[in-house]
Image (cartoon, rainbow, N blue to C red):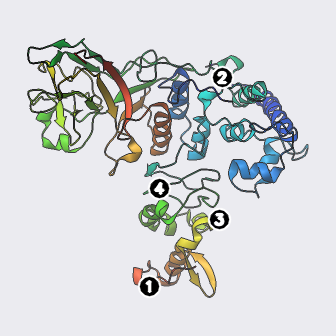
Amino acid sequence: MGRPPHSRLLMDKIGLLACLINVALIEGHRPNDNSGRPWSEAEFAKSVLNDVSRTKDVKGWSNRNGAANPPNRPANIIPLLRAFYGISRVEDILGFDGLRADEMREMYRAWRVAGGAFDDDVPPLPHTIEARSFSKVANIVDLMVSQPTATNDGGRRMNITLRIHPDTECSPISGHAIDIGVAGAGTRSAGPEAEALHVGPLLSVKADDWQPKVDTIFVNVQHPNVGSTGRSGAVRILGPTDKLGRIDGHPLRDAPEFEMEPINENAAGAIKFQVSIANPWRSEHGIETGFVLTRRDGGPISPVKQAVVDALFNAAFPRDDYGRLLIAEKTLKAGGVK
Amino acid sequence: MITRPDAYPGLTLDMLRRLIEVAYAAPEEGFVALVGLAELDPRTAFRGARLRGLDLRGQDLSGFDLSDAELIDCRLEGANLSHAIGVTPNTIVNSISGIITKPLYTGPNRASNSEGFRHDSAYSAHLCYSKKGGIITFDQYRQEFFEKHGRLPHRWEMPPLGD
């Protein structure tokens, strides 16, 4: 992290941002609308704050409060970008090729710089990484499934390797770093309470033509790191956990080889494995947590910060059929006679 | 036209930056400022959210869409929800029952707390009680009752719901 900008310099940068906002208001920047009809302050306040009476905020952002009143940097630029250009996600900024794309990116950059970021701090957006894995940024979940082999009774046998570890080596940014892990409940030996907490990711298997055999962890076999759930074809991964309650290890180590049996005569369809975690906003009692985010300096994460962090995670990951966040997925071709 | 790289981008480098900015934000930064740091759209990011135990005192949630959201055991004194979208009695009813006794009636914050909900016209129709032809909020009635009787009113001592 560099030296904080001088306040005068920062004011100049806020002035530049205000200038850009003012121009966008006057030129009537609107998504998919090239008419150039200027925004009225009330109309813009309604669009951003859902309140026509908040024209003072708009004046502050666009430096229309007179020379005696310096402009204000909006706390959040996204609602303004939405009103001007139809952008509602940071991830869409780089890929945006609509009307006035350059002006939009310039406004976003000016907002970040006015907040104290250096020009070159603006990351290349979006830095897209395979959507269903943490690879590259945080190495937390590794789901490996071997190619299925046919058994004598027409089933399919495969090895599942699941490794879940908190990533304590995420790159620091501006001198600050966080660790990200996945919450677990400990092993079953910790007692039935652990399972009752409903904490831990689900490992599920889905296939149209196949179902898990009876002697697998998905049906009858007990394993210290696996808890049952009411969901068909799914088990809960409980541990092993570290002292912060994060899963840290090979949950399925020593589990028996996994086998699927056909449920129809010409079974040949694909088999999909998924690891999903709870969407914290869907838990009934606030005890079901998915990600565990900690500051590397040990500082606290307040409930308000946690709520915003949850919102970021919720926006990042796709959902499974039950609204859980998908963090790893693997689809295999099982082969067959179809 | 928006070219979406993916509806759900996963944990990107930029996402990591925003997570770090939120995690290391100053403790006094409120919810609205943190949402700004996270560069989340208040119009979409909190729909359907269950927000539990948050300190939202004095926060201006104008422009936030809280449709199907629940504010559970949150502290809402002085929060402005009047121009939040989709706020219904179900959104905050749990918070009301959980927060108001201590902070509202004792301690140095009382004066500012007594102004709580003064802007909350959006849900005043549901939460306010009529008194002498006017409308006051649930909290204001309890405040006045407390000042007059030195105790909180029982449920049966509350006036009927305003309209």
Q: Which chain is indicated by disc 3?
A: B
Report the quarter where the C terminus of chain A lies.
Answer: top left
Q: Position of residue A312 (x, y in %)?
A: 50, 35
Of the numbered discs 4 and 1, the one sitting upstream in the chain is 4
Amino acid carrying mark 4 in the image: Leu
- The residue wearing badge 4 is B71
**Distance from Cα at disc 4 to Cα at disc 3:** 18 Å
Subunit bearing disc 2: A
* CB atoms of marks 3 and 2 within 8 Å: no
Amino acid under label 3?
Answer: His
Residue A1 vs residue A101: left or right? left
Given the image, on which type of amino acid does mark 1 rest?
Answer: Glu
In the image, which disc is placed on residue A94? 2
> Which of the two residues, A155 or A19, is positioned nearer the viewer here?
A155
Residue A102 or B28: which is nearer the viewer? A102
- Point out the image quarter for the N terminus of chain A: top right
Q: CA distance from mark 4 to mark 1?
A: 26 Å
Work out how far the residue at label 1 is from the one at label 3, CA to CA, in angstroms: 25 Å
Q: Which mark is residue A104?
A: none
